[in-house]
């Protein structure tokens, strides 16, 4: 697939781009079925809601927030991350050769029914360590995603904003209690997704998601690529996991 100039301009302006029906629903179902087995048995490595929010309640200790290191879990996961059709898209967005990361994202992300928590406004780059910001994440919906079950929300153009440190809390979440921030947050957009839709978004883009208040789990797939010129900073998590040139 090749992106047109309008799509490239939209990504440059907004920091994200939605491509509908990118992956066929049969392939999405296969990915989801395998993910559900790993979730059912909580196959490590995982992250729980407790690890994310730090609230010491049993319900959060048992609720899986994400399956980590999915590249090495199953050939079906790996095939999606190395998908040939998406490579021209990534190359165009990054404007250089894409390199797949396994240090960050590389995850099946969940919003489990009634036991998930909200994801606060943040930039993914808050806990990544690279010399440069030319990094893009690829989010694949494996089912319907909407406000009530925790669809991603974005603040268009926030990847270009120079935001002062004091606008974030001690965990590097963008503070919604500040008037200055609320004016920015009011610009948010929420785009419903269906199985097979993908969202590409910049590492500096502010985004969030609601908890899942429905009776069905929401399961998604996310991985991250960088431009080949972007180097991980030594002795950080970003440098300790393998990279795969695409």
Image: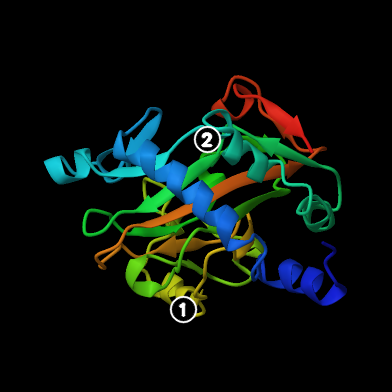
Label disc, if present, on residue 63 of the rendered structure? none
Answer yes or no: do the residues labelled 2 and 1 have beta carbons within 8 Å? no
User: Does 89 sit above or below residue 41?
Assistant: below
Vertical position of residue 243 compared to residue 13: above or below: above
Circle 1: is it few (<14), some (14-19), or many (20+) Cα within 10 Å? few
Q: What element carries label 1?
A: helix
What is the quadrant of the C terminus in the image? top right
Task: Provide residue 132's location: percent of width, then percent of height.
Answer: 72, 42
Seen from the viewer's position, the closer of residues 215 and 101 is 215
Q: Nearer the viewer, residue 5 or 179?
A: 5
Report whether residue 177 is seen: no
Gap in Å between the C-alphas at discs 2 and 1? 37 Å
Neighbourhood count class around disc 2 (C-alpha, 10 Å): few under 14, some 14–19, many 20 upward: many
- Front disc: 2 or 1: 2
Q: In which quarter of the image is residue 241?
A: top right
Does residue 209 appear in the picture of this structure?
Answer: yes
Residue that extends furthest to the front in the rendered view of this protein: 26
- For label 1, the residue is 183
Q: Residue at the spot x=82%, y=67% of the render?
A: 3
Measured from the top left, where is residue 7 in percent x and y?
A: 78, 72
Indicate which disc residue 70 carries: 2
Residue 74 position in % (x across, y down): 54, 32
Q: Of helix, strand and loop, which one carries label 2?
A: helix
Seen in the picture, residue 175 relative to 95 is either above or below; the reply is below
> In the displayed structure, does residue 162 sit left or right of residue 86?
left
Quadrant of the image occupied by residue 151: bottom left
Q: In this view, does 243 lie to the left or right of 191?
A: right
Give whichever of 166, 177 is nearer the camera: 177
Q: Observer-nearest residue: 5 or 140?
A: 140
């Amino acid at each position: 697939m090749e992106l047109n100039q309008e799509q490239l301009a939209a990504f440059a302006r907004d920091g994200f781009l939605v491509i509908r029906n990118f992956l066929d629903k049969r392939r999405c179902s296969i990915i989801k079925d395998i993910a559900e087995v790993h979730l059912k048995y909580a196959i490590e490595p995982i992250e729980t809601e407790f690890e994310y929010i730090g609230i010491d309640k049993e319900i959060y200790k048992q609720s899986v927030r994400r399956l980590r290191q999915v590249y090495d879990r199953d050939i079906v996961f790996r095939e999606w991350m190395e998908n040939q059709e998406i490579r021209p898209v990534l190359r165009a967005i990054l404007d250089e050769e894409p390199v797949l990361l396994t240090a960050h994202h590389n995850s099946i992300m969940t919003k489990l029914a009634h036991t998930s928590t909200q994801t606060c406004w943040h930039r993914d780059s808050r806990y990544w360590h690279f010399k440069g910001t030319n990094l893009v994440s690829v989010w694949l919906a494996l089912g319907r995603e909407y406000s009530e079950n925790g669809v991603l929300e974005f603040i268009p153009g926030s990847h270009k904003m120079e935001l002062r440190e004091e606008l974030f809390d001690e965990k590097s979440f963008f503070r919604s209690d500040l008037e200055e921030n609320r004016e920015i947050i009011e610009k948010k957009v929420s785009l419903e997704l269906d199985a097979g839709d993908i969202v590409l978004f910049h590492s500096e883009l502010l985004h969030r998601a609601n908890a899942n208040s429905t009776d069905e789990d929401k399961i998604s797939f996310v991985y991250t690529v960088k431009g080949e010129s972007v180097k991980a900073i030594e002795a950080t998590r970003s440098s300790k996991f393998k990279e795969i040139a695409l």
